[in-house]
Image (spheres, rainbow, N blue to C red):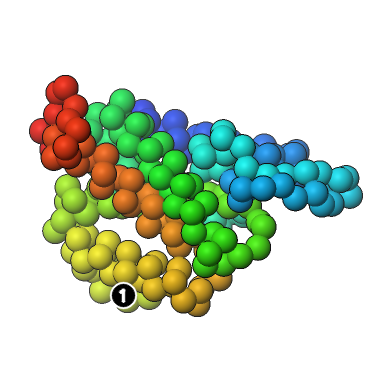
Amino acid sequence: MFSQLPPVIRALLIANVGIYLLQMLLGESALLDFALWPFGELTGTAPDGSTITVGFEIWQLLTYGFLHSGPTHLLMNMLALFMLGGPIERVLGGRHFLIYYLVCVVGAALAQLLTIEYFTGGFYPTVGASGGVFGVLFAFALFFPREKLILFPIPIPIPAWLFVTLYGAAELIFGVTGTVAGVAHFAHLGGMLAGFVLLQYWRGRLPFKPRNPLQL
């Protein structure tokens, strides 16, 4: 089944799992500079007892999307990418899908940076592929709106367009109210928004248009 996946999805799955294994091998502090940190700097003590200084760096807009906080975090993101990413890559093609995924990762990072201090405060890193995954989820609902998905904890399959609408509304509510702490809700929404804007651009529906709009 894995060998039947489109090439970009396979590469993303391998990269995320491989980097997580590297995290486990090297220890938590080894890759701290690749997580997404808020603007500013913080000097503190790493898990191994060494003194470190961390803060935002431009490469973190991408690299944070390949790090994960634990096996459950990794499994949930990769399962969603495995189940939903293939149809989107087949619609967009490998090159456009990779661009789309990475733009969603960056869009999620920017949303997180813009909202983290206002809504949550604190100085802590953000990791995970969820921004890209939520972009894929949005594209799935756009291209396959009548396909049925299950929104936990509701054990009833619902159309993909309704799934994404409810999920997005829940993320917005949780982000504004802070009722589900420890989750980058605005990053998830940023990934969706970035995906929407890029697809609109590719379709030629924005004031600035591509040379060759895609027929999507």
User: Is disc 1 surrounded by few (<14), some (14 to 19) or many (20+) residues within 10 Å?
Assistant: few
Q: Say which of 23 and 40 sits in front.
A: 40
Relative height, residue 116 to residue 83 (above, below) = below
Query: Which residue, given by chain and number where applicable, does mark 1 sit on?
Result: 155
Q: Looking at the picture, how far across and down is residue 105, in whole percent?
A: 43, 43
As helix, strand or loop, the secondary structure at mark 1 comes to loop
Rendering coords of residue 87 (x, y %): 24, 41
The answer to whether residue 41 is seen in the rendering is yes
Q: Give the quarter of the figure containing the C terminus.
A: top left
Q: Is residue 199 above or below residue 177?
A: above
The residue sitting at the right extreme is 49
Q: Amino acid at mark 1?
A: Pro
Tell me if 182 is positioned left or right of 2 in this view: right
Total label count? 1
- At a point 41% along the width and 36% down the height, the residue shown is 102
Quadrant for the N terminus in the image:
top left
Is 187 situated left or right of 23 in this image?
left
Residue 139 is left or right of residue 181, and the answer is: left
Residue 107 location, quadrant: top left
The residue lying furthest to the top in this view is 211
Q: Is residue 17 visible?
A: no
Q: Nearer the viewer, residue 135 or 140?
A: 135
Q: Image point 19% across, 27% down: which residue?
A: 210
